[in-house]
Image (cartoon, rainbow, N blue to C red):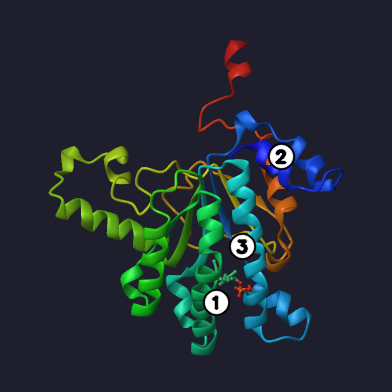
Amino acid sequence: MALTDLLAWVPSGSPDEALARRIDADRLPAHVAIIMDGNGRWAARRHLPRVEGHRAGIEAVRDVVETSARLGLRVLTLYAFSVENWKRPATEVGTLMTLLKRYLRLEIDALTKNNIRFNVVGRREGLAPDIQHELGSAEQRTSSNTGTIFNIALNYGGRAEIVDAARRALTAGLTPDQLDEQQFARFLYTAGQPDPDLLIRTSGELRVSNFLLWQIAYAEIWVTDTLWPDFRRRHLLEAIIDYQKRDRRYGGINQPALAGR
Ligand code: FPP
């Protein structure tokens, strides 16, 4: 898909169309990663139980996944459940898992229609067998899709991923002198994918929260006060417009400054 698919989808004359037209299709971030935060606060502001925030968050997931596919992003990663989230009350954890299952059942056709490949990143073996089954089936049904890869981070921790990668590298028999950054990245959950160019966090918190620690080394960070259930297409477009204004130097200096020497 491409920007034209997005423009065909957004209502003509709407503010979202104006935003979409400001995006430079040749300089899209290859990979956008999102820390979806603020579901609990969204619910609290409405005097609702926390789980209602998660339920409302599904609509934001749907909108962002479809927008990413229509824009033609190569990878979208959503942080849905961390290794630390098991500390939450069992009822909240149970609801999150039920919502995930329901989301997959309801959205699998839309994922397929939009040529999206669904992929799980995290310690999936720590999830309940029925959830693992549902995830595996969604991965399988979308495995031949060639568009956006939708990574869902589940039972995910950045440090856990690095430890898992180190274990896999050792198991594969890599010797210390064979190991460099490129070789190591082959053992991460995201092997073969570009690193995130843009990391978005909702609800105004200025933390990385153990998310894609290796991969975000040079990511541009965009934080919004918007709570996740209120996040929509226009916020993603705003983040990308802002990203396209940034001067990415990867620890070097920018090209005009270099030319001036
Ligand atoms: C953080 O908000 C959000 C989560 C821990 C879960 C995110 C899950 C969803 C949006 C729904 C399920 C996802 C999919 C893909 C089906 P919080 O509860 O920490 O909010 P708070 O900081 O305001 O308490």
**Quarter holding residue 178:** top left
In primary-sequence order, the first of circles 1 and 3 is 3
Residue 145 vs residue 254, the one in the foreground? 145
State whether residue 169 is above or below residue 164.
above
The three-letter amino acid code for the residue at tag 1 is Leu
Numbered label attached to residue 6:
none
State whether residue 89 is above or below residue 108.
below
- Identify the residue at horizontal 58%, vertical 19% (top origin): 255
Using the numbered discs, state the Cα–Cα distance from disc 2 to disc 3 in whole angstroms.
20 Å
Numbered disc total: 3
Observer-side mark, 2 or 3, equals: 3
Residue 196 vs residue 68, the one in the foreground? 68
For the residue carrying disc 2, how many other residues have a C-alpha within 10 Å: few (<14), some (14-19), or many (20+)?
some
Left/right of residue 232 with respect to residue 105 in the rendered view: right
The three-letter amino acid code for the residue at tag 3 is Val
Q: Which residue is mark 2?
A: 241
The three-letter amino acid code for the residue at tag 2 is Ile
For the residue carrying disc 1, how many other residues have a C-alpha within 10 Å: few (<14), some (14-19), or many (20+)?
some
Would residue 77 be seen by someone viewing this image from the given angle? no
Residue 59 vs residue 37, the one in the foreground? 59
Whether label 1 touches label 3, CB < 8 Å: no
- Identify the residue at horizontal 31%, vertical 38% (top origin): 182
Left/right of residue 176 with respect to residue 234 in the rendered view: left
Q: Is mark 1 within 8 Å of ligand 1?
A: yes
For the residue carrying disc 3, how many other residues have a C-alpha within 10 Å: few (<14), some (14-19), or many (20+)?
many
Q: Which residue is mark 3?
A: 61
Q: Which residue is mark 1?
A: 99
In primary-sequence order, the first of circles 1 and 2 is 1
Residue 9 screen position, x and y as percent: 72, 47
Q: Is mark 3 within 8 Å of ligand 1?
A: yes
